[in-house]
Amino acid sequence: MHIRFYYLCKNTSNHMIKPIYSPAADRYENGMKYRRCGKSGILLPEISLGFWHNFGDVNTLSNSMDMAHYAFDHGICHFDLANNYGPSYGSAEETFGLHALP
């Protein structure tokens, strides 16, 4: 499955489109360890990316996307969100939602 992300990156003089993101082909084979979650059989990575204070209004969309892409390229496929993550409250969820836009 190919996931493609298009987004605008704010430049000092204008807006520009960043290149289309394609996940690393070896993202599940590069050393990340996964563990079974209960009896469900779901495999989760040993490391999760929390969106608490590093996403939302405190960072540019471009920087947030770069962090999420880097994590995903290195086998992290679990992202921790809550309805009050930000700052401001809820902005981390809004930022993550922009990652999923086609």
Image (cartoon, rainbow, N blue to C red):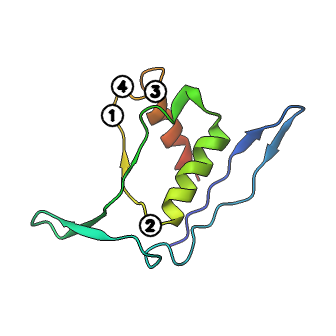
| Residue situated furthest left in the rendering | 39
Of the image marks 4 and 2, the number of the one nearer the N terminus? 2
Cα distance, mark 4 to mark 3? 6 Å
> Which residue is label 1 attached to?
82
> Which residue is label 4 attached to?
84
Q: Residue at x 36, y 39 (%)?
A: 81
Q: Are marks 4 and 1 in contact (CB under 8 Å)?
A: yes
Q: Are marks 4 and 3 in contact (CB under 8 Å)?
A: yes
Q: Hey, what amino acid is under mark 3?
A: Gly
**Residue 4 rendering spot, x and y as whole percentages:** 61, 61
The quadrant in which residue 22 appears is bottom right
**Image position of 53 with respect to 89: above or below:** below
Q: Along the horizontal axis of the image, is 77 left or right of 23?
A: left
Cα distance, mark 1 to mark 2? 22 Å
Q: Which mark is residue 75?
A: 2
Front residue of 78 and 8: 78
**Residue 76 rendering spot, x and y as whole percentages:** 42, 60
Of the image marks 1 and 2, the number of the one nearer the N terminus? 2
Task: Tell me the mark number nearer the camera, choosing from 1 and 2.
Answer: 2
Q: Hey, what amino acid is under mark 4?
A: Asn
Q: Residue at x 70, y 60 (%)?
A: 20
Q: Which mark is residue 90?
A: none
Q: Are marks 3 and 2 in contact (CB under 8 Å)?
A: no
The quadrant in which residue 23 appears is bottom right
Is label 3 in a helix, a strand or a loop? loop
Residue 101 can be seen in this image: no
**Residue 54 rendering spot, x and y as whole percentages:** 51, 36
Cα distance, mark 3 to mark 1? 9 Å
Q: Hey, what amino acid is under mark 2?
A: Gly
Q: Along the horizontal axis of the image, is 50 left or right of 88?
A: left
**Image position of 28 with respect to 15: above or below:** below
Q: Residue at x 73, y 42 (%)?
A: 8
